[in-house]
Amino acid sequence: SCLEGYACPKPSVQIPCTLGSYCPVRSTNEAPCPAGSFCPSPDVSQICSAGSYCPLGSVAEQQCKERYYCRTPQSEVECQPGRYCPAGSVVESLCPKGFFCQTTDNSTACPAGSYCPEGSQIPRPCPSRSNSNPGQEDISGCKCEEGDSPRELTEEGDSCDRDD
């Protein structure tokens, strides 16, 4: 009988399988390690863990790269603009509130004088005559300057007017 890690095209012939292949007991030919698994040696096949990528013939699992997400270990999908995919992502996420994502692998805190709703690729500036602290999630974080009204901004298009 043919042993693990070997291919036996004939009962009397045992050929060692190469790295990146998987040859269970009684293999008649060498087969690549299946996608979604990794084979550190030809006689061992292990399932790839979540957030990892294991294409056909893998000898080790690889963490899903930044700017990509791996819903399954067999596929690596490019993250879309305005989404956020750090290394090891299993889904693409909207860029979080209070941050902007100019690239899909990096989220940056929203700077002072702006606000960043979920999914922002660039910060949105506060209306003229208003300002905000860093990390604001919506326009309500923009405050009119002293002596202007309204003091609170609540929706897109609101502006600050000078009280005279």
Image (cartoon, rainbow, N blue to C red):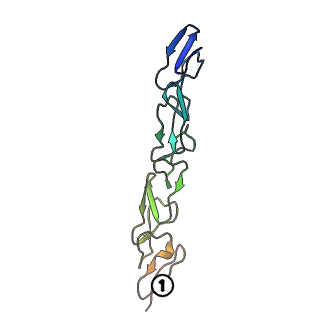
Furthest residue to the bottom?
164
Image quadrant occupied by the N terminus: top right
Residue 67: x, y in percent? 46, 47
The residue drawn where x is 41% and y is 83% is 145
Height in image: 155 above or below 39? below
Furthest residue to the left?
112
Q: Residues within 10 Å of mark 1 (few under 14, many from 20)?
A: some
Q: Nearer the viewer, residue 15 or 112?
A: 15
Image quadrant occupied by the C terminus: bottom left
Q: Nearer the viewer, residue 59 or 77?
A: 59
Quadrant of residue 130 in the image?
bottom left
Quadrant of residue 131 in the image?
bottom left
Quadrant of residue 24 in the image?
top right
- Residue on which disc 1 sits: 151
Q: How many discs mark residues in the rendered view?
A: 1
Residue 81: x, y in percent? 49, 52
Amino acid at the residue labelled 1: Arg
Identify the element where label 1 is drawn.
loop
The residue drawn where x is 55% and y is 18% is 3
The residue drawn where x is 50% and y is 65% is 97
Height in image: 115 above or below 38? below
Residue 113: x, y in percent? 40, 72
Q: Nearer the viewer, residue 72 or 148?
A: 72
Residue 105: x, y in percent? 44, 51
